[in-house]
Amino acid sequence: MKKIFAVLSMAFVVALMPVKAQPGEDFFNLGVRGGLNFSNMSGIKDMGQDGFLKTYTGFNAGLVFNFNLPLGFELNPELLYVQSGVKKDGVPASLKTGSLRLPVNIQWGIRLLGVVKPYVVFSPYIGGVLFSEGTGMLDIEEKFINRLQYGVGIGAGVYIWRFQVSFKWNWDLNTVIKENSEMDLPHFGDLKDKKFNGGELSLAFFF
């Protein structure tokens, strides 16, 4: 009963919010974001091989800061916790990392019907790995994991009232394993040269 009352109370509060106070109309809006990540370490040279499109599913969550700019542009810095990972086909082996990431989304879109705004986005990002966890042949000591993450993402999304739905594809530009690390992984070939990449599907709500 308490849970039902809490949900109804939240719905009542949201319903009372003014319709005109939407992202893209005020200069600044604060929001919360959450969603799923679909990551792997596959590159173009891996195309056609077993497990090329197999992904590890993690989650992302955090804060988004919306700055409305002229001519349909917006600047959306985010502070996110992001899970990335990889699974090895045919054997019980996986590697996942948890990172604190700072993307800076540069967006452009056109508002339609007053409450809908589709947009495209370019998103450079930088972050730091907080922890890593491996199983089986990918049980890698944390000292070999590259703590620095940086890369770029591109994607698209749509605002509907105070909500934002988006999809981006992110490419890390540095390797998961530190360069020149003295690590022997004969069962996973060129893991030292691998980089995380993958999709990010998320939903945001702006206050």
Image: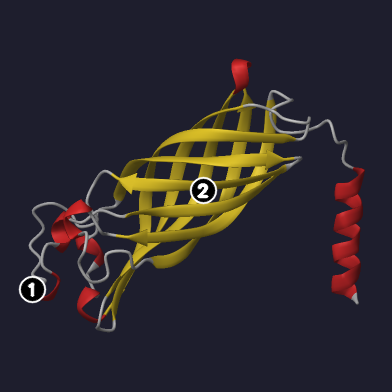
Vertical order, 113 against 33 (above or below)? above
Check disc 1 and report the residue beneath it: 186
Residue 94, position as x, y percentages in the image = 30, 74
Is residue 175 positioned above or below 87 on the image?
Answer: above
Q: Residue 183: x and y, percent?
A: 10, 66
The 10 Å Cα crowd at callout 1, few under 14, some 14 to 19, many 20 or more, is few
Which marked residue is nearer to the observer: mark 2 or mark 1? 2
Task: Tell me where residue 35 sits by quadrant.
Answer: bottom right
The image shows residue 103 at horizontal and vertical percentages of 46, 39
Q: Is residue 33 visible?
A: yes
Q: Secondary structure at mark 1?
A: helix
Side of 200 where 131 appears, left or right: left
Q: Residue at x 87, y 56 (%)?
A: 11
Q: Amino acid at mark 2?
A: Phe
Residue at 90% in and 59% down? 9
Colour scheme of this structure image? secondary structure
Q: Where is mark 2, residue-wise?
A: 167
Residue type highlighted by circle 1: Pro
Left of 203 or right of it: where is 132?
left
Q: Answer above or below: position of 86 versus 164.
A: below
